[in-house]
Amino acid sequence: MTKRALDRFVDEMLAEGTAQSSYRSLYYDCASTVHHDCFSLDSLWLIDNNPRLWNRMVVLDDELNQMERGLVAESLYRNTLARLVSIVTEARALYVCEQGQEFQ
């Protein structure tokens, strides 16, 4: 997840008030677990080498944005967010493997 997407999410949540504050909390909790993965992963590398994963990340991010506006059940939001975190982790592992580096 890009910083821009995270900032956009927070701005939308603040604009919609406290009714969705649990979404913001969930998002930040999950984003913090993969923060290092997101910013140490070269997005251009991912687009060029695994466009399928990149596309899945974009689609899930879009789904989350739509859910935030529609006040969906928290369990559905959590599942979608977990899938996004899993894909980010998978992408980072592929990147590290290809770069010949170890996780830190």
Image (cartoon, rainbow, N blue to C red):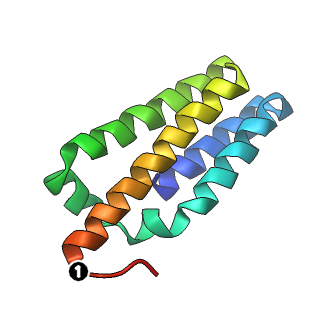
Residue at image position (34%, 37%) is 56
* Front-most of residues 27 and 11: 27
Residue topped by disc 1: 100
The picture quadrant where one finds residue 96 is: bottom left
The x, y position of residue 7, in whole percent, is 59, 51
Could you classify mark 1 by the number of other residues whose Cα lies within 10 Å: few (under 14), some (14-19), or many (20 or more)?
Answer: few
Q: Where 98 sits versus 73, above or below?
A: below
Residue at image position (38%, 42%) is 57
Q: Where 42 sits versus 23, above or below?
A: below
Residue at image position (62%, 61%) is 32
The x, y position of residue 9, in whole percent, is 60, 42
Among all residues in the image, which is located at the extreme right? 18
Q: Is residue 88 left or right of residue 77?
A: left
The picture quadrant where one finds residue 21 is: top right
Query: In this figure, what is the number of numbered marks?
Result: 1
Q: Is residue 68 visible?
A: no
Q: Where 34 sits versus 87, above or below?
A: below
Amino acid carrying mark 1 in the image: Gly
The x, y position of residue 63, in whole percent, is 48, 27
Q: Is residue 57 visible?
A: yes
The x, y position of residue 102, in whole percent, is 35, 81
Residue at image position (71%, 27%) is 74
* Front-most of residues 35 and 3: 35
Q: Is residue 102 left or right of residue 38?
A: left
Q: Where 8 sits versus 31, above or below?
A: above
* Front-most of residues 45 and 92: 92
Q: Secondary structure at mark 1?
A: loop
